[in-house]
Amino acid sequence: MTTQQDIMELERRFWQAMVDRDIDVATSLLDRHSVSVSGGGIHHFDPSEYKAMALAGDGRITSFSFSDERVIFPSPDVAIASYRAEQSFTMKGKRHDMVVYDTTTWVRKDGKWLASGHTETPHRSGF
């Protein structure tokens, strides 16, 4: 039986792959068709399109930590992870820190868990 710990380990593997710029590990965790929603818009992509996005631009996550983790299982082959992420990243040679609230929908296909959907909302104080 898959547990919250198992799914959050997949999240950490994906984020660490971004830190390490290990595109092969990241794409191995993606479904054939995935979607990401953030302040930058809606992006539908397959693993090869993710690779092109990951290699484009100069932004790079350099570290991260998670808290307030929770995973729900609406069905045995679907898991939705939610958590708070503190991340540091570089953009145009400058370091930035950011807190975001994320969800990832994981779907088990042929015995393997794959990320199918991801949302990210930046933390805003004062509301």
Image (cartoon, rainbow, N blue to C red):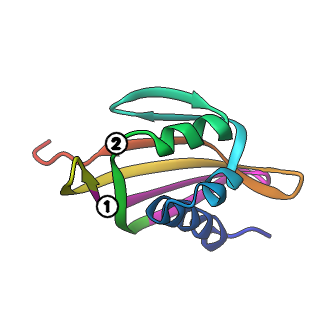
Q: Which mark is residue 76?
A: none
Is residue 108 shown above or below 4? above
Of the two numbered discs 1 and 2 in the rendering, the one whose residue sits closer to the viewer? 1
Q: Residue flagged by tag 1: what amino acid is it? A: Gln
Q: Nearer the viewer, residue 32 or 49?
A: 49
Q: Position of residue 25 (x, y in %)?
A: 64, 60
Q: Label 1 belongs to which residue?
A: 87
Residue 2 appears left or right of 68: right
Q: Residue furthest right?
A: 110
Is residue 83 shown above or below 74? below
Residue 73 appears left or right of 15: right
Q: CA distance from mark 1 to mark 2?
A: 13 Å
Say if the magenta span includes residue 81.
yes
Q: Residue at x 53, y 67 (%)?
A: 12
Q: Residue furthest bottom?
A: 5
Residue 5 lies in quadrant: bottom right
Residue 124 appears left or right of 4: left
Q: Nearer the viewer, residue 73 or 114?
A: 114
Q: Which residues are magenta?
A: 69-89
Q: Position of residue 110 (x, y in %)?
A: 89, 52
Say if the magenta span includes residue 29.
no
Q: Badge 1 local density, few (<14 within 10 Å), some, or many (20+)?
A: some
Q: Label 2 belongs to which residue?
A: 121
Q: Residue flagged by tag 2: what amino acid is it? A: Thr
